[in-house]
Image: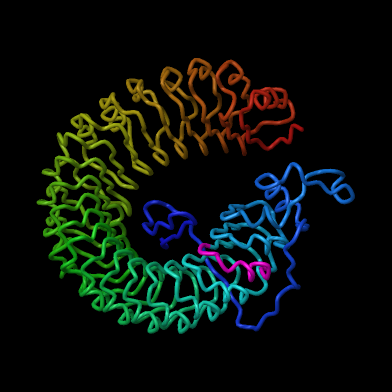
Amino acid sequence: MGLALGMRSWPILPLLGALALSFACAREEFAPQRAVVCEGEVGVPDPALRALLLDILADPEAHDEESTGGGPVLTAESLATLTGLQAAGLGIASLEGLECAVNLRTLGLARNEIVDIRPLTWLGELREVELSENPIARHDPLSRLVKLEKLALGGADVKSIGFVAGMTALRHLDVARGEIDDLAPLAGLVDLESLVLSDNKIDDIGPLAGLHELFALSLNGNAIGDIGPLADLERLEYLDIDENAIESLAPLASLGRLRRLEANANAITDTRGLAGKPDLVELGLEKNQIAALADLGGLDGLVSLDLDENLLTSLDGLEVLAQLRTLTARINAIADIGAVTGLTDLRRLDLRDNPDLVDLSPVAGLQYLDYLGLGGQGVAPDLAPLTGLPLLRQLDLIDGATTDYAVVTSLPALRVLRLLNAPLDVADLTAIAGATALTTLDISGAPVTDLGPLAPLTALVDFSASGTRITALGPVTDWLELDILRVARTPLQSLAGLETVLGVDQIDISDTEVDDIGVLLGIKAFRQNDRLDARGAPLDDGDCDDIRALRERGATVLVDPPCE
């Protein structure tokens, strides 16, 4: 995930979800669009921009009888009072007239249709500019805006950033999602604090070596193999190098201030360079070639670690991460999880798709565990070590089997149980039914023909049995708390009885044998924002009255008959 810059506070922390921006430029010399005369009435031909400016600035005493029929006009004097303008997503195509807003300091024009930005040439007081997601033809006019501190020009097929070379006041720059391959123009911007270069064509980051003020840097989605130039950027706190060709993290050894590091989808073979970062909170190493875990000492603050899709056979080395709360290690070859024994702060542990993992005894002491993911690839773990875990709220056991599902009845906090593609039989369903506090149960893909054994689960709010072999709803019609029902791709014949489940609001009967949905008309609350998916079910034009009636209530009804 890339770092992001916002127009007002320009936060860098990706967790805040700030709007990601990007930039574009051209090297050609440019000429002003026209001679600028800012006196009296100013013409603003773009209707969207004009309407916005009139709403903000119109002088009620100024009128133009000929061109506006006596309506309000924009004057140079009023435009000169404008210091900030936010106009994102308004469909603006032309900035003509804005050149007279000579005191603008902040300008937000993201997601418009702007091609020509020459009017900005005259706005020398600008400090913050956002023009992301505009089809800008030439970006060189921005080179005159030497007071800029924050710049965003994104989604505009960026090929060169030469125009920023003289912008020595820049503190925050985002040039993501372009075709940049040369970072030389950045070398002199020594006061940069945050820089986003995501999704370009960069393979050489040498020019970044002297940017010692950087605390946030995003390089994901490039072709970088060597991160050596980052070795002396000791102020870095947030670094995203996802989706590159990096083999070693060793150059990061001296970056002791790192708080978040994303290094997913590279060619990393070991964890050298990570030790001694006490402030590191999140570490992403998914989709690499790591076979062993070492050099993890001194990560005293690490709470989240992603090791999915590596070459691990053991979690040895993690025992030093005493504060770890979230660990994901899916799609490895892990057989030994002994290292988690002492990680007593763990809340989330995802070990799905490790075909050799059957011994769960190290999990027995994880008293704060909230989520556990197991199974996949036919794994059949013994769940006995989970007995009595006091806070386990969700258990996912995917595409696997176990010898005794009765363990779930010993988990007092268990509310969510997902058993996708599990080879369940009547005895298994009977055991599961003992967990009467369950609110979510998913048995999709199981070879189940009868839901009868699940009758005691009257607290269910969300039930999924898609891809099973059921022909009737059975006890579902007695689950009066049910909100969500998914029984797609089954030989289900009828929804009879569902009218008693008055709160159900999401129903998926796609690709079933249900040929009548009239029963849903009896659920008076099935209306606005509720949803029925019956695509692939044998409904025809004879069902259109019912379909239209549900739609008239405001429900979303997805069916094959057009029923116009």
Q: Residue 302 is drawn in which quadrant?
A: bottom left
Q: How is the image coloured?
A: rainbow
Left or right of residue 123: residue 452? left
**Where residue 102 sits in the image (x, y, percent)?**
62, 63
The quadrant the C terminus occupies is: top right
* Residue closest to the eye, 234 or 323: 234
Q: Is residue 514 visible?
A: yes
Q: Residue at x 50, y 17 (%)?
A: 502
**Where residue 4 sits in the image (x, y, percent)?**
44, 60
The quadrant the N terminus occupies is: bottom left
Q: Residue at x 26, y 32 (%)?
A: 414
**Where residue 336 sits in the image (x, y, percent)?**
16, 58
Q: Is residue 264 visible?
A: no
* Residue closest to the eye, 239 or 236: 236
Q: How many marks?
A: 0
The magenta segment is: 117-128
* Residue closest to the eye, 361 or 322: 322
Q: Is residue 126 magenta?
A: yes
Q: Residue 534 is drawn in which quadrant?
A: top right
